[in-house]
Image: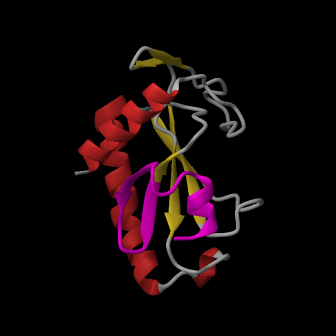
Amino acid sequence: MNVTAEKFGYPDAVVKEFDHWAVLVRPAQPTLGSLVLVCRDAASRFGDISQAAAAELQQATSAIERVLAEAFDYQKINYLMLMMVDPDVHFHVLPRYEEDREYAGAHFVDATWPGPPDITAANPFSAEVKAQLIADLRARFG
């Protein structure tokens, strides 16, 4: 795998692996269920991903949206491709919520709703909550 995936906790934080993409729980959760979708291709520009990865992106995003809707009933979803620090092609996936969410005893707020998300924000939660989130999402992805 690549350095971007490793930075976001690969392989421990993985909830689903596709042939060309990996879905990981973000270590910081600006909103409940925030993920990182990392391309497995050796590409640092979106235009350089393989045709196979581009085709599989639809499958990956459909699965992400289904799983997060079932799990957390988000109102909107944001995909951010910033690539300012981490070199490999990836998206920050942020489900957005008009109202606060409770999960495994932790309280999650979407502090910038309905405006643009702040990916530097983080809701506080324990390692146990993170482990539960990873396990729950893995089970839902199947």
- 95, 16: nearer the viewer: 16
Residue 123 horizontal side relative to residue 37, left or right:
right
Q: Residue 73, can we see it? A: no
Q: Quadrant of residue 29?
A: top right
Q: Quadrant of residue 129?
A: top left
Residue 67 horizontal side relative to residue 87, left or right:
left
- Residue 11 x/y as whole percent: 46, 57
Q: Quadrant of residue 30?
A: top right
* Residue at the spot 67% in from the left edge and 76% down from the top edge: 44
Color theme of the render: secondary structure
* Residue at the spot 55% in from the left edge and 44% down from the top edge: 26
- Residue 73 x/y as whole percent: 36, 30
- 137, 66: nearer the viewer: 137
* Residue at the spot 44% in from the left edge and 62% down from the top edge: 22
* Residue 3 part of the magenta segment: yes
Residue 5 horizontal side relative to residue 102, left or right:
right
Q: Is residue 125 above or below residue 12?
A: above
- Residue 78 x/y as whole percent: 55, 46
Q: Which residues are magenta?
A: 1-23
